[in-house]
Amino acid sequence: MSELLNNGEAKKEKLKDMLKKLQEGVDEDAIKEEFKDVLRSISPLEIPLIEQELVAEGISPKEIARMCDIHVEIFRESVRGAENEIKELPSGHPLRTLYEENIEIMKDAEALNLYASSLTRLKGEKRENVLATLKNIVKGLKLIGRTHYNREEMIDFPYLERRGLNAVPAVLWRKHDEIRSEISRLLREIERKNYEEVVKLSQDLANRLIDMVFRENNILYPTLKVLLGEGEFKAIREVDDEIGYYKVHPGNEWNSDAPQIMPYEVKDELTAEQLMNLPQHLLDEMKEKMGGIDKIKADKSELIREGDVKIEHGYMLPEEISTMLATVPVDITFIDSQDRVRFFSGGSRIFTRTESILGRPVQKCHPPKSVHIVNKILQAFKNGERDKAEFWINMGPRKIFIRYYAVRKNGEYLGTVEVTQDITEMKNIEGEKRLLDWR
């Protein structure tokens, strides 16, 4: 066996032979052990290519699909350690959730590859049915970017960046975006029924998804486990729900009495023990991208400055708040629960406001002929009958959009905010202009 495992082509042939045996009805348990011996020395990216060769050799997609569960087990084995990690972590722990989502992602990558491979051999209605199934699979894959990857980018990566480990988040985020882009591209080719391109892109996407699972399970998650304590994982668990999950519903078995630690509260340098326990993949990447672990510099910047005002989701200086509101291209006016004007934004306004209106009943800021409408709107907001009122008017060649929103917290009416915006240019917007298009 050792000679076999030193030869890449021989390993592929051995896997193909075992898959054929499974298809022919050989006992699964006996074959699984042989699989494990080979898979410990083979890249998980090669498995889909082997399946494609089986399709080309005449084994029907239906027969290959029957082996799907075995293939998934193969994938799990190829991303070594994941099963043990899951068993060690209680339900609801953020790391367990990430590992469990990756199992679902591997299943979907497997299904994507199998259905795409079958397109090359099918014709007519059968091919149309497979294409429709493939389209549903790919549309579902979009959720990976919006949940699994998004949580890592927005919630987990900041904890690594604060410790100076910037290379891994940057690399993974770039690869996440490549996968997102490929999913969108594949959907377009499916719509065009460009079968040859659909097969090619599907197989490439399946490989990318599997490669990402391998990187996350062997680099990202072990690194998080070494560096993060209970307080940090507790903070992650609290905000994970806000983004959502990929085909996994975390339980509530795990909890911690430790105080939550947000990324901006992390100020410690990496210890020698932590560095020693980091995965070798990460150490190799740091050496390649950063020149070695001695180049790591933790981010010790303070979030809260002298004079900052604590608002619900952050801290800002009073002049930052007022200048920000004066800068955004909307006029904002706030009326409290007693119908009195409490605030208006500065800057270049569509409708002029002066400080003389502060504390004034809003009814007295409108012409007498429209006061009864103002009262109707406010009463509907206070009663909970309505949440907004919208109007639009012409001012010469300009189109002005005026909106009133009921401001509530936990169901309690706090007041009304008026937002006025010139939407003349916005009405002519077509297509897309993305961040990367900026000049």
Image (cartoon, rainbow, N blue to C red):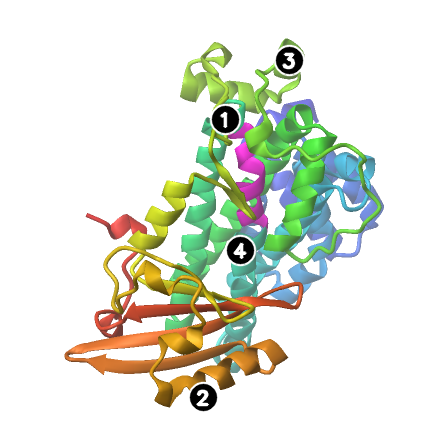
Real-space CA distance between mark 3 and mark 4, rounded to the nearest whole angstrom: 34 Å
Amino acid residing under circle 3: Met
The reply to whether callout 1 and callout 3 are in contact (CB within 8 Å) is no
| Whether residue 223 is situated above or below residue 28 in the rendered picture | above
Q: How far is the residue under mark 1 from the one under mark 4?
A: 30 Å
Magenta segment range? 148-161
Pick whichever of labels 3 and 4 is earlier in the sequence: 4
In this picture, residue 260 sits left or right of residue 193? right
Question: Element under label 2?
Answer: helix
**Which amino acid, by three-letter code, is at mark 4?**
Arg
Q: For residue 192, what is the image quadrant?
A: bottom left
- Image quarter where the N terminus lies is top right
Furthest-left residue in view? 397
Residue hosting label 4: 146
Number of the label disc, if any, that sits on residue 246: none
For disc 1, the marked residue is 302
**Dominant secondary structure of the magenta stretch?**
helix
- x, y percentage for residue 406? 53, 71
- Residue type, mark 1 in image: Glu
Kindly indicate the quadrant of the structure image that contains residue 129: bottom right
- Mark 1 vs mark 4, foreground winner is 1
Residue 276, which numbered label?
A: 3
Quarter location, residue 187: bottom left
Give yes or no for residue 207 being in the magenta stretch: no
Check disc 2 and give the amino acid type: His
Q: Residue at x 55, y 29 (%)?
A: 160
Camera-nearest residue between 412 and 140:
412
